[in-house]
Image (cartoon, grey):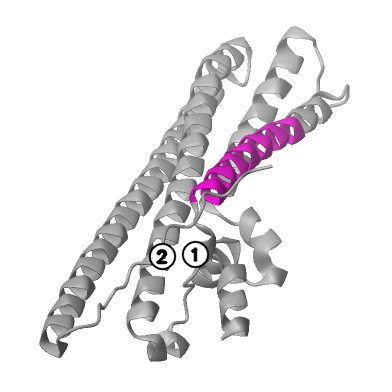
């Protein structure tokens, strides 16, 4: 089990005292919070830019590989030289696809980290101006519930959303390439043509590839969640916030 760090004492964001001095302090606090918020937004934007760039690079390489395979197939009538060329080219594309998927998974976890940070900043905004809380449509807590609220993820659509993300798309394409590679190997080295089950072996390889990608992504997400649960103070979670509201 993960142990949560003990919550530090809540800082007094607007200390009592002279009204002018308190207003000045509050202005400085809001400025610092807003600067950090924009910094996180900029970092998140850079992460998404890298994500789309990596996916575009992989799909561009894949398109070029398909065109090259088509030209070689036309010139060799799908004979031995074509299979040799495919066995040399497809592993390269698959490796690039795997590294792209791994990096996209990391980017998603990094994005969740930035979103948690912005949720924590919004909690500071609410502490400064509690009457503004009803106007926030995004999360103000540093936990899974706050993440779902910020991402606007609803219970009925989470499973489907996972299947249509950029990493999932890359995983499907990369697994399909792996299946094609296995089918070519089965046809060339084992003599298994369409009638003998070469595509069936390729389909099994496709499912294995999907399982490997899903396992890697799930493992990375769970590692991130464990780190987040340990590093999040208790008073930043929605459960603690609801308890405070009930006591009030």
Q: Is residue 48 magenta?
A: no
- Residue 80, picture quadrant: top right
Assign the C terminus to one quadrant of the image.
bottom right
- Residue at the disc numbered 1: 236
| Residue at point 54%, 27% (across, down) | 94
Q: Secondary structure at mark 1?
A: helix
Please name whichever residue, 131 or 186, is drawn nearer the observer in this view of the structure: 131
| Residue at point 51%, 67% (across, down) | 151
| SS majority, magenta | helix
- Residue at the disc numbered 2: 120
- Contact? badges 1 and 2 (CB < 8 Å): yes
The residue stretch that appears in magenta: 206-231
Q: Is residue 85 above or below residue 16?
A: above
**Would residue 207 be found to the left or right of residue 248 on screen?**
right
Please name whichever residue, 102 or 89, is drawn nearer the observer in this view of the structure: 102
Assign the N terminus to one quadrant of the image.
top right
Please name whichever residue, 138 or 4, is drawn nearer the observer in this view of the structure: 4
Q: Most extreme residue toward the front, as rendered? A: 17
Measuring from the top left, give residue 215's x and y in whole percent: 68, 36
Q: Is residue 208 magenta?
A: yes
How packed mark 1 is, by other alpha carbons closer than 10 Å (few <14, some 14-19, many 20 or more), is: some
């Amino acid at each position: 089990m993960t142990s949560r760090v003990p919550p530090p004492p809540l800082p007094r964001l607007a200390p009592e005292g002279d009204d002018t001095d308190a207003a000045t302090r509050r202005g400085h606090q809001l400025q610092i919070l807003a600067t950090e918020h924009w910094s996180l937004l900029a970092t998140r934007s850079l992460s998404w830019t890298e994500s789309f760039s990596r996916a575009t690079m992989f799909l561009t390489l894949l398109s070029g590989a398909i065109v090259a395979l088509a030209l070689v197939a036309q010139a060799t009538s799908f004979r031995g030289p074509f299979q040799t060329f495919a066995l040399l080219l497809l592993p390269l594309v698959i490796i690039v696809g795997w590294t792209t998927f791994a990096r996209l998974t990391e980017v998603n976890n990094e994005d969740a980290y930035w979103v948690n940070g912005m949720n924590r900043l919004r909690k500071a905004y609410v502490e400064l101006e509690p009457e503004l809380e009803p106007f926030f449509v995004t999360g103000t807590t540093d936990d899974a519930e706050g993440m779902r609220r910020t991402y606007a993820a609803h219970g009925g659509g989470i499973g489907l959303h996972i299947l249509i993300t950029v990493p999932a798309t890359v995983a499907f394409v990369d697994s399909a390439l792996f299946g094609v590679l296995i089918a070519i190997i089965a046809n060339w080295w084992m003599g298994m043509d369409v009638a003998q089950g070469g595509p069936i072996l390729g389909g099994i390889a496709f499912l294995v590839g999907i399982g490997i990608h899903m396992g890697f992504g799930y493992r990375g997400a769970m590692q991130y969640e464990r780190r987040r649960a340990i590093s999040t103070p208790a008073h930043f979670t929605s459960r603690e916030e609801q308890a405070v509201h009930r006591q009030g």
